Image: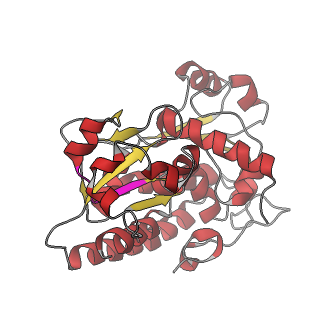
Amino acid sequence: MPCPPSANTSRRSVLRKLSLAGLAGSAVGVAGWPLRAMAAPADAKSPNPGAPPGSAADGARLITLGGGITEVVYALGAQALLVGTDTTSLYPAAAQATPKVGYLRQLSAEGLLALRPTAVVAGADAGPPVVLDQIRSAGVKVELVAADHSWEEVRRKVAAVGRAAGREAAAQALQQQLDARWQAVQERVRAQPPARPPRVLFVLSHSGSPQVAGEQTAADAMIRFMGARNALGGFQGYRPMTAEAMAAAAPDVILTTTQGLEAVGGTDAFWQRPEVALTPAFRQRHTPRALVHLDALELLGFGPRLPDVVERLHRQVVRA
């Protein structure tokens, strides 16, 4: 069911803030995950019907901070244990209805403790650190998951949620399925490398002046995973999208987020920017490959959907 205009506006606002603050730097079935990777949904009357009485999950109350981590909870079918999530947790749609504790880098101990969690699973950039210390002092288990824009990051998220939910066995089973899927996608990417990998430039334009992604960013990792080449290198993080940068990058393909494209007024408005006119992508702007966009969390969240996203980008960008 489409969200009302106010909900759509709120969602775009959240994702814009989320990207600028760290998301960018850091056979599909139900809810967008492979059917074989979906665990049985938790019974509404029991927080974890698959766990034996007296297990670690009995009475577990989870707060997740980070959209990719929250996705793992749903992939495990442990959503009945969720008592709160942060504002970056927007997928699947049911996650948007969970109580929100605020943005993961601007937390308050009072807001978190009011939900009486037994465990908090968060990205390593969650904070402020003093708030997490207060949560620990209150007896709540806090587990931080390091982000390095790798497949291991996804594996760490699955393992951390499995421990917090008392579903280690289910998490291991899910991880085996995801590993097999990831290996199959990577083999497909490596099977027929193009003679000249396309030069892809990621543009972040959620608010303010657009920026372009260099090395050690989530966007750089996604470009490499799909079998393409980052059009910019020699620096880490993000830089302003200047005419000089665009001319030097000479991208064949421009990759961005759907929310960022909306923020600049859509596809036509994006192509009207004078910096973009200096690129090979601009000369191919009437082809589907010239400008590719995905939902920000899907593209940069490094959750269980990662293999499907890489496969889709490989087909659309590299094999097109």
In front of the other: 101 or 253: 253
The quadrant of the image that shows the C terminus is bottom left
Residue at the spot 58% in from the left edge and 26% down from the top edge: 132
Residue 200: image location, x then y, percent: 29, 56
Q: Is residue 302 left or right of residue 200?
A: right
Residue 199: image location, x then y, percent: 24, 58
Residue at the spot 31% in from the left edge and 61% down from the top edge: 283
Q: Specify the segment rendered in magenta.
A: 250-255
Vertical relation: 141 (above or below) 267? above
Residue furthest to the right: 45
In front of the other: 113 or 118: 113
Vertical relation: 241 (above or below) 199? above
Residue furthest to the left: 195
Vertical relation: 186 (above or below) 141? below
What colour-coding does the image apply? secondary structure
Residue 230: image location, x then y, percent: 25, 52
Q: Is residue 215 visible from the viewing direction of this image? A: no
Residue at the spot 19% in from the left edge and 74% down from the top edge: 193
Residue 112: image location, x then y, percent: 71, 31
Q: Is residue 49 left or right of residue 186?
A: right
Residue at the spot 75% in from the left edge and 57% down from the top edge: 80
Q: Is residue 88 left or right of residue 203?
A: right
Is residue 6 on the magenta stretch? no
Q: Is residue 172 left or right of residue 279?
A: right
Q: Is residue 142 visible from the viewing direction of this image? A: yes
